[in-house]
Image (spheres, grey):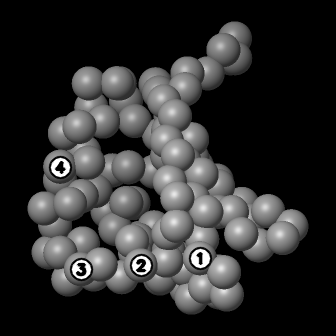
């Protein structure tokens, strides 16, 4: 299993709107498409949204992302998600847990 650690800098004053969009539409779509969101956080000054999504393998990432962006639900969102985001950083990480 691999994970994406995603850090978004949210435009000032838009965090509440972003959280509503994320929890109401983006996260449920991820769940439906088999891209589980493991956890999400907001930093204390409310400018960064940090979240982790899980994939079965690194090869699965482009396939699942293509499904996500081609879905009618994501297409219907148009630029609503990106209008909230000033900067995006994505890292692919692997667990080193023995369990």
Residue positioned 52% across, 34% down in the render: 91
Mark 4 or mark 1, earlier in chain: 1
Image coordinates for residue 85, horizontal then vertical, percent: 50, 69
Mark 1 or mark 3, earlier in chain: 1
| Residue 37 seen in render | no
Q: Residue furthest right?
A: 44
Q: CA distance from mark 1 to mark 3?
A: 17 Å
Residue indicated by mark 4: 66
10 Å neighbourhood of mark 2: few (<14), some, or many (≥20)? few
Q: CA distance from mark 4 to mark 2?
A: 20 Å
Dot 4 and dot 2 residues touching (CB under 8 Å): no
Is 67 on the left-hand or right-hand side of 3? left
Residue nearest the viewer, comparing 19 with 14: 14
Residue indicated by mark 1: 11
Mark 3 or mark 2, earlier in chain: 3
Mark 4 or mark 3, earlier in chain: 4
Dot 1 and dot 3 residues touching (CB under 8 Å): no
Image coordinates for residue 69, horizontal then vertical, percent: 20, 60
Q: CA distance from mark 1 to mark 2?
A: 8 Å
Residue indicated by mark 3: 78
10 Å neighbourhood of mark 1: few (<14), some, or many (≥20)? some
Residue indicated by mark 2: 83
Dot 4 and dot 3 residues touching (CB under 8 Å): no
Quadrant assignment, res 74: bottom left
Is 1 on the left-hand or right-hand side of 49? left
Mark 4 or 3, closer to the camera: 3
Q: CA distance from mark 4 to mark 3?
A: 15 Å
């Amino acid at each position: 299993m691999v994970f994406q650690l995603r850090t978004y800098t949210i435009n000032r004053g838009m965090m509440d709107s972003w959280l509503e969009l994320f929890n109401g539409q983006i996260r449920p779509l991820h769940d439906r498409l088999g891209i589980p969101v493991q956890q999400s956080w907001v930093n204390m000054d409310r400018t960064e949204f940090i979240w982790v999504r899980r994939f079965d393998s690194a090869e699965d990432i482009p396939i699942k992302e293509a499904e996500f962006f081609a879905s009618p639900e994501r297409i219907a969102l148009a630029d609503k998600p990106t209008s909230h985001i000033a900067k995006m950083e994505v890292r692919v990480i692997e667990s080193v847990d023995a369990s």
